[in-house]
């Protein structure tokens, strides 16, 4: 499957509304670049506005998700089951519905990011949406949530210097820790993930890179 064509077609299907923050990002970057005698580094860009946009996976730079999942399984004493010669793509993708967030994070090749402080909206493939906030609000829970693990995934984020830190509690009772940074002058998004499904004895450690397309 051609990743480039797939990404472009998917962007045509995803409804993407450019907020005032998107315009602010473009205006701010233009001012930074105007009259600059040297290229602007990613560290100098206003991260909270410049990470907004449309991103598509860079397979050459990213870890192979199946390899990292298998490494975690084997580290916990299990047998990955894929076999040395089985190179089927997205081999470990799928499973119960409560694992969907893990799959979106580790396998989806397209990510659209919107930001209207304090809300951040991630849109993955198939229109799958993940909405969370950076104002420290707490999750609303009930007694049933405590005993049953809750009925919805929960994520919260915080900006730390030039990074977005996102912590999630998926429905299965596991967790994720994600660190988003900009590299290569802001044209590439680096996502470092620690993914710990409840059923895994060891976490999946994964780094993925996405190229800006807007």
Image (spheres, rainbow, N blue to C red):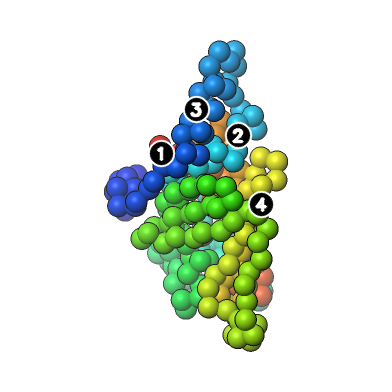
How far apart are the two marked residues, 4 and 2, measured between alpha carbons? 15 Å
Whichever of labels 4 and 3 marks the residue nearer the N terminus, that label is 3
In percent of width and height, residue 78 lies at 61, 77
User: Foreground residue, 6 or 172?
Assistant: 172
In percent of width and height, residue 134 lies at 63, 53
User: Foreground residue, 85 or 175?
Assistant: 175
State the count of labels: 4
The residue singled out by tag 3 in the image is 27
Whichever of labels 2 and 1 marks the residue nearer the N terminus, that label is 2
The residue singled out by tag 4 in the image is 158
Whichever of labels 3 and 1 marks the residue nearer the N terminus, that label is 3
Contact between marks 1 and 4 (CB within 8 A): the answer is no
The residue singled out by tag 2 in the image is 46
Q: If the image is split into quadrants, where does the C terminus sit? A: top left
How far apart are the two marked residues, 2 and 1, measured between alpha carbons? 18 Å
Whichever of labels 4 and 2 marks the residue nearer the N terminus, that label is 2
Q: Secondary structure at mark 3?
A: helix
How far apart are the two marked residues, 3 and 1, measured between alpha carbons? 18 Å
Q: Secondary structure at mark 1?
A: loop
Q: Which mark is residue 213?
A: 1
Whichever of labels 1 and 4 marks the residue nearer the N terminus, that label is 4
Left or right, 138 with reference to 152: right
User: Foreground residue, 2 or 148?
Assistant: 148
How far apart are the two marked residues, 4 and 3, measured between alpha carbons? 24 Å
Mark closer to the observer (1, 4): 4
In percent of width and height, residue 162 lies at 66, 40
Q: Residues within 10 Å of mark 2 (few under 14, many from 20)?
A: some
Contact between marks 4 and 2 (CB within 8 A): the answer is no
């Amino acid at each position: 499957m051609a990743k480039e064509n797939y990404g472009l077609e998917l962007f045509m299907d995803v409804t993407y509304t450019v907020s005032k923050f998107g315009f602010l990002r473009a205006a701010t970057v233009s001012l930074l670049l105007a009259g600059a005698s040297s290229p602007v580094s990613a560290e100098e860009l206003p991260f909270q506005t410049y990470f907004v946009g449309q991103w598509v996976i860079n397979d050459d730079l990213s870890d192979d998700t199946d390899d990292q999942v298998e490494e975690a399984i084997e580290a916990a004493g299990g047998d990955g089951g894929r076999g040395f010669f089985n190179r089927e793509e997205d081999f470990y993708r799928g499973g119960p519905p409560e694992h969907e967030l893990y799959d979106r994070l580790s396998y989806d090749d397209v990510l659209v990011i919107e930001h209207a402080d304090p809300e951040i909206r991630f849109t993955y493939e198939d229109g799958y949406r993940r909405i969370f906030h950076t104002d420290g609000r707490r999750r609303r829970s009930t007694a049933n949530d405590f005993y049953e693990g809750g009925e919805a995934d929960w994520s919260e984020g915080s900006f730390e210097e030039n990074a977005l830190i996102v912590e999630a509690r998926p429905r299965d009772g596991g967790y994720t820790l994600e660190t988003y940074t900009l590299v290569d002058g802001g044209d590439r998004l680096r996502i470092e993930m620690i993914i710990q499904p409840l059923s895994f004895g060891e976490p999946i450690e994964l780094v993925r890179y996405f190229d800006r397309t807007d």
